[in-house]
Image (tube, grey):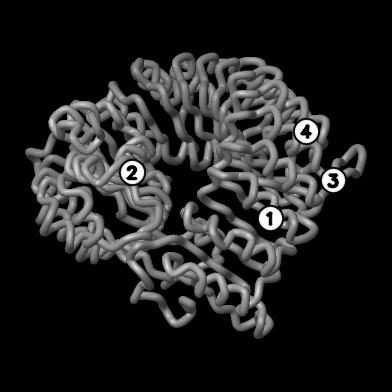
Amino acid sequence: MSTSSFPDEVLEHVLVFLTRHEDRNAVSQVCKAWCSTEGASRKKVFIGNCYALSPEDLVRRFRKITTLVMKGRPRFTDFGLVPHNWGAHMYPWIRTMALHYPGLEELRLKRMTVSDESLEMIARCFSSFRALSLTSCDGFSTDGLAHITRHCGNLAELELQENEIDFRSGDWLTSFPDTYTSLVSLNFATVRPTVNFVDVDALERLVARCPLLRKLKLNKEITLKQLQRLLLRAPNLVDLGTGSYSSNLSWAQLSELQTTLARCKDLRSLSIIWDVAPMFVRTLYPVCLNLTTLNLSDVHLPTADFAKLISHCPKLQRLLVQDDVGDKGLQAAARYCKDLRELRVFPARDDGCATEEGLVAISEGCPDLRKILYFCKQMTNAAMATFARNCQNLTHFRLAILKPYERDCVTQEPFDEGFGAVCRECKDLERLALSGFLTDKTFEYIGQFAKKLETLSVAFAGETDLGMQYILAGCTKLRKLEIRDCPFGDEALLAGIRRYLTMRSLWMSSCRITRLGCQFLAEKNPHLNVEIIKDTEAPEQLVEKLYVYRTIAGHRNDAPSSVETL
């Protein structure tokens, strides 16, 4: 039987079992009939770049989606390299979806501009709406949030992560109807503390009447006393973010807090992303035994206190911590957390505390590690090679040596052999971030061995255009390439003149590319948007920032004057 005559009803039943969007995409490319059937049956759509297509393209291709996950501005927005008014407006998408997807249930947006008008339209047009997740978004206020809480009677999830929110009133919490009971997840942990942003009494009432609540992440406004009252009303939490874990409590009050925490038998994830007083750490011990995730990414915790805390977490699989716990703290994590799958070590200060010793210790104690982000003050090739041999199931390796162009602190050699070992030993490597002094040899190793690599981030590295050419020629599954402060010029850029059509995006800043080279790339690839972000301090012929992405929607019409599309 040919694929074109394969019954649609049978295919639809088969597609139910395909949940990964990569698998769905592969099915849609078999033939036009399969593409149509797959589009008609897909419920969840992921869009990695909001300008890769138009809202009209979306509704033409997918007719019944209930969940949309979408990203907007480039990742370098987080580092201040993208103009604030760059674009990624959500309103055109909401307006179109309101006409075609009345059954929309979930929106998960990252680095988008979301207006209050958009939030009001979501609240009024999608009667079944149940989940809103906004990460690194801007353009909205507490008034917009109040529309969601007031009108979305089925809302189960509200996630606010690293957003720029204009505070106008605290009504967003009080607007939940008294009859509302469906909340499962509420996260406003990273919302900047503002007077009256949180009506604690309203929050307590809300938590008390939502028996299905499993995730609650609080911002710095919430004190330990208020936290205890909330926990008494939500003993079935699975994921808790504590707010400020530092206040003036008596020993009797600390004991009460510890007892309350001990009642949270289902707790599996704990985040303390604000202040924590070392004397309060012991109150966390009762919940540590079953934790699988511990987030201390913004907490300054002395090594001894961290080691005591981590010794109570034998089931931990995901750990986020600051590097001021030092190598000894990481050695403690390696000793007690044998099932660790993901580790992120963030810098506490500019000079750094973690070294190659901590990396080696983790690899020896946690052989099942899959992902690591490691900020450190120094490194060696030998340590990286040891790490790679011990953690061969690794999929994400991001090393960030705090000083650019640092060499092996023992041999003074470049880090070519260290990264070469990681690419050679870790066959499933999907994401890689480079750091330290590197020659073209590193890029040759990456092109030769990292055949599953999808995302590569490069900063302050490389010698010649040959380095970038190795990557573009060898990494056939590459989807995102991010380059800054590297000596790559037009020859390197144009080496990927055909490859960029199979990638999601290319970012280059502070390199050696020229306007002429970028213009040539744009002329040869009409399905690419080649955007120059202008910088008045850059030499006239050099391009300071370049963003290239594939699109079926053509040039966008909302670019500010600081962005030129070639």
Element type where label 3 sits in the image? loop
Report x, y in % for residue 249: 46, 32
The mark nearer the N terminus, 3 or 4, is 4
Residue at the image position 50 percent from the left and 56 percent from the top: 75
Q: Which residue is mark 2?
A: 29
Element type where label 2 sits in the image? loop
Q: Nearer the viewer, mark 4 or mark 1?
A: 1
Element type where label 1 sits in the image? helix
Instruction: Evaluate whether residue 133 shows in this view.
Output: no
Q: CA distance from mark 2 to mark 3?
A: 43 Å
The mark nearer the N terminus, 1 or 2, is 2
Q: Residues within 10 Å of mark 2 (few under 14, many from 20)?
A: few
Residue at the image position 62 percent from the left and 65 percent from the top: 494
Q: CA distance from mark 4 to mark 1?
A: 30 Å
Q: Which residue is mark 1?
A: 469
Report x, y in % for residue 275: 52, 41
Element type where label 4 sits in the image? helix
The mark nearer the N terminus, 4 or 2, is 2
Q: Is residue 501 above or below residue 203?
A: below
Q: Residues within 10 Å of mark 1 (few under 14, many from 20)?
A: many
Residue 356 badge: 4
Q: Nearer the viewer, mark 2 or mark 3?
A: 2
